[in-house]
Amino acid sequence: MPTSTPDLSTRPIGVFDSGIGGLTVAHAVNKMLPHERLIYFGDTAHLPYGDKSTAAIQAYSIKICDLLLRQHCKVILIACNSASAAAYELVREYVGSKARVLNVIDPIVEHIGQAYAERNVGLIGTKQTVNSNVYKKKIDDLDAGVQLQSLATPLLVPMIEEGFFNNTISDNIIRAYLNNPELSNIDALVLGCTHYPLIKEQIADIYQGKVQVLDASDVVAKHLKKYLEDNHLAAKPTSLAPVHHFYVSDFTRSFEESTRIFFGQEVHLEHYPLWE
């Protein structure tokens, strides 16, 4: 007897990050694709990934993918620049045909190539993302004449995780980074970390319209929408709103508070230790 093909469109989308920064991507996806059910995993026990070795990030990513595959995710979105840089190829190989794997770097690279050919573009991100040179390699491969100027900004993630934004302290730190000569004479700045959308307005205020500030979360959400539609994986609209699940590998009350800020609404976090 022929077996019927399972309807993958009803399955959830898995999203993971080193902490809760990827909730900015999950939120953008939720706004653009309100019928999709999300399963989010924040590896809060190991954050930030930005100063971890490639091997460590790969090990964490594989472990997280095991959980997301057990939840029958149709797509796994690596909502972390550091993990996208360090583990995307390995994760794709590991997951195989069980789910599609997307990252947050390719959509923004494609966008830069289309919108900023022959121009100077700045990038801020973690040490892992910047030192991996992954953005530069991919942008150079486009051959669109884009000059990428990158700067590692390691203080920004812990600052944001601790709730320091929209105040004088964060303003001084952001300003010090943006005034670095590495970022001079740019037409656009890529926020190469999923935490940074929370300080997008602060950055835009400093630039006063002279530099376009590119928030990858919106670009990634658009890319995901097109990907689901092109591959006939998009969920069908229903009258009931989907129930999302949010897991973290280490639980603290402050994460629950911050989660509301990152996701833009109340979220219940479930504690799921990765290594037990």
Image: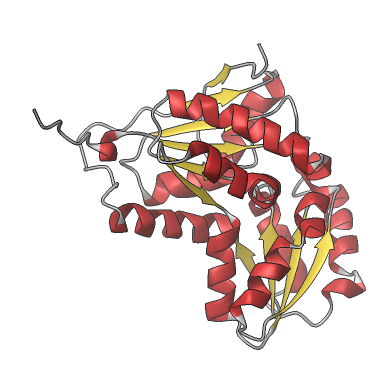
Quadrant, the C terminus: top right
Residue 64 position, x and y percent, is 58, 29
Name the residue at 84% across, 66% down. Answer: 178
Residue closest to the eye, 96 or 207: 96
Quarter assignment of residue 71: top left
Left or right position of 40 against 230:
right
Relative side of 150 to 201, left or right? right
**Could you tell me which residue is drawn at 83 percent across and 52 percent down?**
127
In the rendered image, which quarter is residue 206 located in? Answer: bottom right
Looking at the picture, does residue 110 appear above or below residue 130? Answer: below
Note whether 75 is above or below 63 in the view shown.
Answer: below
Query: Does residue 30 sit above or below 250 in this rendering?
Result: below
- Left or right of 48 on screen, residue 169: right
Q: Position of residue 129 (x, y in %)?
A: 75, 54
Outermost residue, left side: 1
User: Would residue 106 be seen by someone viewing this image from the given angle?
Assistant: yes
Q: Identify the residue shown where x is 69% and y is 20%.
A: 250
Name the foreground residue: 163 vs 135. Answer: 135
